[in-house]
Image (spheres, helix red, strand yellow):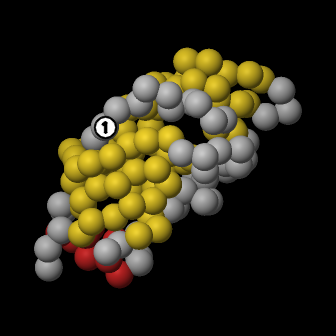
Amino acid sequence: MSSVAFAGYAAVFDVVDRAGDVMRRGAFAGAGVVPLLWQHRGLAVGLLASVREDARGLRVEGVVADLALARLVRGGAVAGLSVGYRATSVRQGVRRELLSVDLVEVSLVAVPMQALARVEVVP
């Protein structure tokens, strides 16, 4: 078993997450490559080659180097993605709208906070 390449969305815009927050377009403006973690903890489990906003959300591409986790991603048992961030600009209404954040890390997760934040491509 070897590492596995993947792509997907770590956040999708204008979708309410399990905490009631909504990430808005432009929230990740200027974000660069950050560590790839497992469940927001520990050491990096791989590398992100690309982190960028598009019309849908925060698109990421990378490689899972941890062999046990790579096997789970390849098999579809782990397909959730999530972002670790510090909010820098929010608008509070019925929902907390995240207008700007400092991206700290992206994680592969068993259950994503945002249901549509998923690994979509495993070549």
Is residue 71 at least partly visible in the picture?
Answer: yes
Residue 59 picture location, percent across and down: 46, 50
Q: Which image quadrant is residue 105 in?
A: top left
The extreme left residue here reads: 2
Q: Amino acid at mark 1?
A: Val
Determine whether 11 is above or below 105 in the image.
below
Is residue 45 at least partly visible in the picture?
Answer: no
Determine whether 34 is above or below 101 in the image.
below
Q: Which residue lies under the disc numbered 1?
A: 33
97 or 61: nearer the viewer: 61
Residue 64 picture location, percent across and down: 24, 61
Q: Secondary structure at mark 1?
A: loop
Q: Residue at x 50, y 41 (%)?
A: 53
Residue 7 picture location, percent across and down: 39, 61
Q: Residue at x 40, y 51 (%)?
A: 60
Q: Quadrant of the C terminus?
A: bottom left
Q: Quadrant of the N terminus?
A: bottom left
Whether residue 80 sits left or right of residue 40 in the image: it is: right
Give neighbour class at mark 1: few <14, some 14-19, many 20+ (Cα, 10 Å). some
The extreme right residue here reads: 94
Determine whether 88 is above or below 3 in the image.
above
Q: Residue at x 18, y 68 (%)?
A: 3
**Total labels drawn:** 1
Whether residue 31 sits left or right of residue 42 in the image: it is: right
Q: Residue at x 79, y 34 (%)?
A: 95
Residue 79 picture location, percent across and down: 45, 68
